[in-house]
Image (cartoon, grey):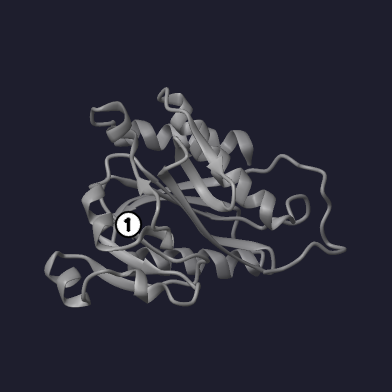
Amino acid sequence: MDRPGAACEMRRMSRDIDVVRLGRQRYDEAMSHMERLVMGRSDGVERDTLLLLEHEAVVTLGRRKGGEANILVPEALLTAKGIELRTSERGGDVTYHGPGQLVAYPVLDLRPDRCDVRQYVTDLEQVMIDVAAHYGIQAERVSGQNGAWVGGKRKIGAVGVRIARWVTSHGVALNVNTDLSAFDLIVPCGIRDKGVTSLSKELGRPIDFEEATAVFERAFRAIF
């Protein structure tokens, strides 16, 4: 990751961000779209963009070493369940994406006013915390762990980012109506003593996904 330098100023500025809703896509398709945007943003020919989507079922491995050990079943069993397995350039360990989970990939040039990696992650966490609050759910940060948590033990939203030349990619995954049983196939994010939850599980009812997407977009715009 880059570190703050002469090109960066810590005074926050307002910025215009395009929002693109991709619907439900396979992981490879979404990555191709995101990577094209990253290249264009790095070259100055694309605007800051937020991609909002769902993935078809996929388990992804981040750059943290040893993540393979946190996949609890053979790849053949994942395939039999219709779950793809992919490596990813994001930070972090293993996670699951699938229908009912809201995935957000911000492709932003953090220069000149947001050149702070830790603050960027904190801001992404805050977006998810604010979305949960909209639904009356108290989410929070847990010391030493990324993401948004309920009750300090149940992760409702995960963060895994990449930043190169201050241009961001990958992002967050917020469990809205996610089938949480899929997380039983892995050790989510390599954390063995905590679980996962979703907006729908916490409220005991399905959540309108389009509404949740709109709430997320508003929360993101308010912070970024």
Residue occupying the far right of the picture? 6
Q: Is residue 84 above or below residue 110?
A: below
User: Which quarter of the figure is the N terminus placed in?
Assistant: bottom right
Q: Is residue 41 left or right of residue 24?
A: right
Whole-percent x and y of residue 154?
39, 42
Closer-to-camera residue (135/71): 71
Whole-percent x and y of residue 16?
Answer: 63, 43
Residue at 52%, 32% in the rendered image: 130
Q: Position of residue 215 (x, y in %)?
A: 44, 31
At x 29% / y 72%, what residue is drawn?
85
Q: Which residue is mark 1?
A: 97
- Left or right of 119, for residue 157: left
Q: Quadrant of residue 185?
A: bottom left
Residue sticking out furthest to the left: 80
User: Which of 23/186 is in front?
Assistant: 186
Residue toward you, 21 or 187: 187
Q: Position of residue 120 (x, y in %)?
A: 65, 51
Q: Quadrant of the C terminus?
A: top right
**Residue 67, can we see it?**
yes
Q: Residue at x 57, y 70 (%)?
A: 39
- Residue farthest along the front direction in this orientation: 193
Disc 1: CA contacts within 10 A as few (<14), some (14-19) or many (>=20): many
Residue 198 sits in which quadrant?
Answer: top left
As drawn, 44 above or below 180: below
Q: Secondary structure at mark 1?
A: strand
Q: What amino acid is at disc 1?
A: His
User: Left of 160 or right of it: where is 42?
Assistant: right
Q: How many marks?
A: 1
Q: Is residue 17 visible?
A: no
